[in-house]
Image: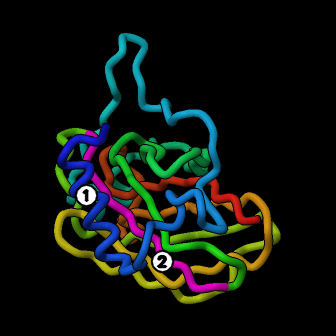
Amino acid sequence: MLGAPVALRLSIVWLVCGCGGTFGLRDAGAVGRFAIGGADLHCGLPDGGVRAQPTRQAACALTAADFDGGLPPEEVPPEPRFGGDGDDDDCKYHLTVSSSAIALNKAVTLGVALMSKVDGAPVLGADVMPQIFLSDDHPAPDTAPMSMESAGGIYSVSPVKFDAPGRWTVRLHLFDQCVDLAEDSPHGHAAFFVDVP
């Protein structure tokens, strides 16, 4: 059973999305949905705890000169997760993602609730933007999606389109304007599989 804060957050996502009726990717009657599979456990620790990376806004402005040549390795894109809940690649954030009903070549709105892994607080100012593709040589149509933020770390991203059947990857970029050089940069990514029949 969902706790009250999570249930409230999902309700807010539904209102922001303005989808009407039921929430597409969580509704068995919808055309498309998040792919079903194993839970996201990549932030779990061997002792049963959870890894949570703090962030700081000042890390956005760091440059290569701040690191004396000791830059981190180039970032590897996050592994897509199953279901609509998961953590970003660096265990900074937890995302709950939903959508309006998915059908081929129809405008879709993504609803994203973003929380800090450190304290569960809503994450503000993330400018959530999608990168969606079926394969490396088949990106989603360029629909110039926009991210709208409402209170409580809730984002609405639209429009996006799926123009072919198959298992798509929806990669979400968070704080993309931040330089991603420091471990505690707010910059982050998360990805989810979406099945489109």
The one nearer the camera, 6 or 121, is 6
Q: How far apart are the alpha carbons under marks 1 and 2?
A: 17 Å
Q: Amino acid at mark 2?
A: Thr
Q: Position of residue 58 (x, y in %)?
A: 21, 58
Q: Residue at x 43, y 77 (%)?
A: 157
What are the residue bounds of the magenta stretch?
Answer: 106-117
Tag 2, which secondary structure? strand
What amino acid type is highlighted by mark number 1?
Arg
Question: Is residue 184 magenta-colored?
Answer: no
Q: Nearer the viewer, residue 142 or 10?
A: 10
Task: Indicate yes or no whether the magenta region holds residue 108.
Answer: yes
Q: Is residue 104 left or right of residue 146?
A: right
Q: Main secondary structure of the magenta part?
A: strand
Count the marks. Answer: 2
Q: Nearer the viewer, residue 11 or 107?
A: 11
Expressed as whole percent of the image width and height from the top left, the position of residue 192 reads 57, 53
159 to the left or right of 55: right
The residue shown at (25%, 67%) is 12
Where's the N terminus, which quadrant?
A: top left
Q: Residue at x 23, y 41 (%)?
A: 3
The residue to which callout 2 is attached is 109
Residue 19 is situated, as x and y percent measured from the top left of the image, at 42, 78
Who is closer to the viewer here, 140 or 108?
Answer: 108
Q: Residue drawn 55% across and 54% down?
A: 191
Q: Residue furthest top?
A: 47
Q: Is residue 187 left or right of residue 83?
A: left
Residue count near mark 2 (Cα–Cα under 10 Å), binned few <14, some 14–19, many ≥20: many
* Residue matched to label 1: 9
In this orientation, does residue 64 appear?
no
